Amino acid sequence: MSDAKSHYLAGLKHFGQNKFEEAILEHEKALALKPDWADVLNALATAQSKAGRHAEAVATIERAIQIAPDDPFTFTSLSIFLQRLGKIPEAESAAAKARLLNWKEELKKNPNAPPPEGGFKVIQD
């Protein structure tokens, strides 16, 4: 296996078998060949989180956000990983950003789309 896609797919297969460390290794190999592949960064972050490596997952998903700053999925993932670290206000902020990005996408298709339920507010202490 020498191409990034093969490593990515192997990582997904390992992930599906709950072999998270093996998935991490395959995704890292894919990124060594194609470092700016946001989908692989998302997959790597998810595997890291499932392996209990939550701080690494946050750092990885932040790299994905740098590459794809308008992708609501990355902010949803960031929210989940921050929740697992107990960083609830930060997680709520990331979730609000995901809702905002989703709404912006919806507005492209439906200019009259109402804002999402719950809005974009973040609970502040």
Image: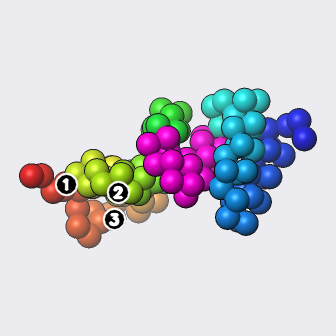
Give the residue drawn at x 72%, y 43%.
25
Residue of label 3: 113
Q: Is residue 33 visible?
A: yes
Say above or below: 11 vs 65: below
Closer to the chain start, of discs 3 and 2, is: 2
Magenta stretch: includes residue 42: yes
> How crowded is the residue under tag 1: few (<14 C-alpha within 10 Å), some, or many (20+)?
some
78 versus 106 height, above or below? above
- The mark that comes first in sequence, 1 or 3, is 3
Indicate the secondary structure of the residue bearing disc 2: helix
* Residue 74 appears in view: no
User: Which residue is denoted by mark 1 in the rendering?
Assistant: 122
- Left or right: 122 with respect to 112? left
Location of residue 51 by image quarter: bottom right
- In front: mark 1 or mark 3? 1
What's drawn in magenta, residue-wise? Answer: 38-58
The front one of 48 and 107 is 48
Find the distance from the CA under tag 3 to the CA under tag 2.
29 Å
